Image (tube, grey):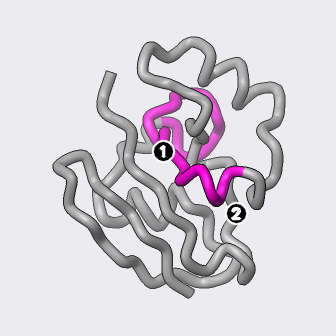
Amino acid sequence: MKINVTDRAGNALVLDCEEGDRLMDVLAELDLVEATCGGECSCATCQVYVDPGWLARLPAREELEVELLDELLNSNAQSRLACQINLESEMDGLTVTIASAE
């Protein structure tokens, strides 16, 4: 499966990934996000902005993710933490933009 990513420099990338991969791991492997906490949902360094057409197709944010995003100055309605998104086959073509560093 493929996901579409715009990095912090504005470069558009198409990444190959496997069903079951965690979005954060795919992005961190290419140094697109820091993922400081290793996916424990405690640092928010893997924040992405999800394309509006995809937001409703992703699982809902859980309470801890909502709390972390609320603390960030650069979060918005499209913000998600990549560590909380496990890629499934129906997410083929998912489009995200890496959030700017705070």
In what quadrant of the picture does the C terminus appear?
top left
Where are the magenta residues, as a range?
37-55
Q: Position of residue 70 (x, y in %)?
A: 62, 16
The image's mark for residue 58 is none
Q: Residues within 10 Å of mark 1 (few under 14, many from 20)?
A: many
Mark 1 lies on residue: 48
Q: Nearer the viewer, residue 97 or 64?
A: 97
Rendered residue at 68%/51% (across/down): 55
Say if the magenta span includes residue 34.
Answer: no
SS label for mark 1: strand
Marks 1 and 2 sit apart, C-alpha to C-alpha, by: 14 Å
Q: Is residue 87 above or below residue 19?
A: above
Earlier sequence position, callout 1 versus callout 2: 1
Circle nearer the viewer, 1 or 2:
1
- Tell me where residue 30 sits by quadrant: bottom left
Q: Position of residue 87 (x, y in %)?
A: 67, 70
Residues marked 1 and 2 touching at CB (< 8 Å):
no
Q: Position of residue 20 (x, y in %)?
A: 70, 75
Q: Is residue 39 left or right of residue 101?
A: right
Q: Is residue 56 above or below residue 70?
A: below
Q: Is residue 65 above or below residue 49?
A: above
Q: Nearer the viewer, residue 40 or 85?
A: 85
Q: Nearer the viewer, residue 64 or 75?
A: 75
In what quadrant of the picture does the N terminus appear?
bottom right
Q: Farthest front residue?
A: 53
SS label for mark 2: loop
Mark 2 lies on residue: 86
Q: Nearer the viewer, residue 46 or 39?
A: 46
- Tell me where residue 58 sits by quadrant: bottom right
Q: Is residue 63 left or right of residue 5?
A: right
